[in-house]
Image: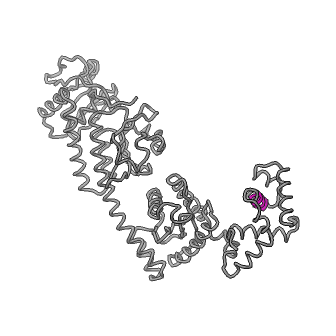
Amino acid sequence: MSTIERTLTLNTLQQLALPLGTAIVSGEANAGRPVRWLAVASGAGALPFLEGGELLLVAPSLVTEMWVRAAANAGVAGLLMTEPLAPLPLSAAQMLGLPVLQLPAGSRLREIERAVLTVLLSNSANAKERSLDIYDQLMRLASDTTDLTAIIQELSRLTQKAVVVQDKRLHIREYSVPPMLSGVFDHIRAGLEDRDLLPASFQDRHKLPMATTPTQLHALGRDDLSRLITPIVTQGIGRGYLSFIAHEFTDLDALVVQHAAVICALEMARAKAISEVEKRLRGDFLDGLLLGSMNEGEAVAEGERYGHEMSVPHVALVVRWQGAANQHPSIRRLETLVNGLALRRPGVFLSRLRESEVRLFVKAEGPNPIQAMRELAGELLRDSRAEYPDARLAVGIGQLTARANGWRGSYKDATQAADLAQKLRAETPLFIGDLGIYMFLSKQDYRDDLIALRDSTIGNLIGIEERQRADLLATLNAFFEAHGNHTATADALSVHRNTLSYRMARIAEITGLDLNQPDVRLAVHLALKIHKLLGSET
């Protein structure tokens, strides 16, 4: 079971007692050695009396290669240097794996000695004081920068832990890994995004503000690593998670991770406020473009002002919820899904929430841009199913356009495709270029004639008992998908050939039609598409 380590180590002392900016210049892999006491080497060439486990404070003028070897043989935990070591003694320490900590210039030795001894004698109170020092330093950094990356890198440097910031869907937003963990971080990264591996009380992000234990420690199950994790909460809403990852933790780490989560919350709230303003301005630009209120040159200049590359072809996508308004999440939830995709695909698309849909204009690059659109839309569909398992999305994809003035036409195409996706209850994105027959069938001028064709061919089939109707309609659809091949149809339905033959005979008996006749087969295939589009309309 993972626990927070209360034995004082070199890493712990670096966090609790040594000045900020103290660096480990040798033996970093052994910085977890326990420290029993502080000793000071003052006599030229001689080691003080040592029992093992001491942190040895020494001036570099005393240190030779032989001196380093003697200190290592005496079992010291490490050397604390007031000035940089000469190359030969430093090389000897590195070969022996002896930790050497280099104090920053201007350090006051008497104050350092007092601070280290105080920590060794009384750990808990100093952990709180040191955590507040780190909090103050991070707050100063946050006031000087709007870059969460810089804050996380500094936090990792101060704690010598891997530091990971994840959003509410567990997508990694920022991370920083110290050198000693760089070789193992990739092994555990995928597991960090698995909600099932979170502590049970953190798995429902909507309940994060109510968590009675704000920080939890649990093993990651690989490389003897553990995660110290706490929620990031703003305005009573769980926005994400902050994790420290290491082989062991101290009381200081537990305090710092909570303080750091507050700073992350402030930074995320600030970034969100800026993002909302930028999103509104980009949305106003898209509205103007779709209304036709700017020419090509104005559109390109305005789009690039927002950092979007306008010189490449684009494709419009329209995304909506399927079903009635009371059967799916709010449109704001859909916008949040799209925003999450934008974070993972920075600079790829511009988006706009309008009424009951989100409009995307996506850069089309690569040899098969429409397939790339399907893949991007598929990623959004997967996000939606993961977050809202009972809800379904309708996604329409417009035609490729090389000019900004063509975005309006691509959007109209995507709207028509999204309309059909809703009518057909499509589980996959629909590209306007694949929907020619449905575009024809959806014309209101032909509605009565289409219903008459449907009723005259498969009307009797539609009127039978529901369960039998569903089986026979599925059989007909599979038959046409397989181009009339009975073996492929049976395989698609996972039924025996005899079962298929029985169903086809029942269809012929109910409809009175001979599917061996090409014209009849065409009429029935068309009637199925009409039924799929219009349902039971009369």
Quarter placement of the C terminus: bottom right
Q: How is the image coloured?
A: one colour
472 falls in the magenta region: yes
By secondary structure, the bulk of the magenta-drawn segment is best described as: helix
Q: Could you tell me residue 496's position as x and y percent?
A: 82, 48
Q: Could you tell me residue 366's position as x and y percent?
A: 57, 62
Picture layout, residue 499 above or below residue 121: below
Q: Is residue 274 left or right of residue 316?
A: left
Q: Could you tell me residue 298's position as x and y percent?
A: 43, 80
Q: Is residue 13 left or right of residue 345?
A: left
Q: Could you tell me residue 80's position as x and y percent?
A: 22, 30
Residue farthest along the front direction in this orientation: 465
Picture layout, residue 191 above or below residue 276: above
Picture layout, residue 243 above or below residue 527: above
Q: Residue at x 37, y 51 (%)?
A: 238
In which image quadrant can residue 159 be found? top left
Q: Choose between 330 and 221: the one closer to the eye.
A: 330
In which image quadrant can residue 30 be found? top left
Q: Residue at x 76, y 57 (%)?
A: 468
Q: Is residue 410 left or right of residue 345?
A: right
Write the start and end of the magenta stretch as one range: 471-482
56 falls in the magenta region: no
Quarter placement of the N terminus: top left
In which image quadrant can residue 460 be found? bottom right
Picture layout, residue 342 above or below residue 533: above
Is there any visible trace of residue 149 in the rendered image? Answer: yes
Q: How many marks?
A: 0
Is there any visible trace of residue 178 in the rendered image? Answer: no
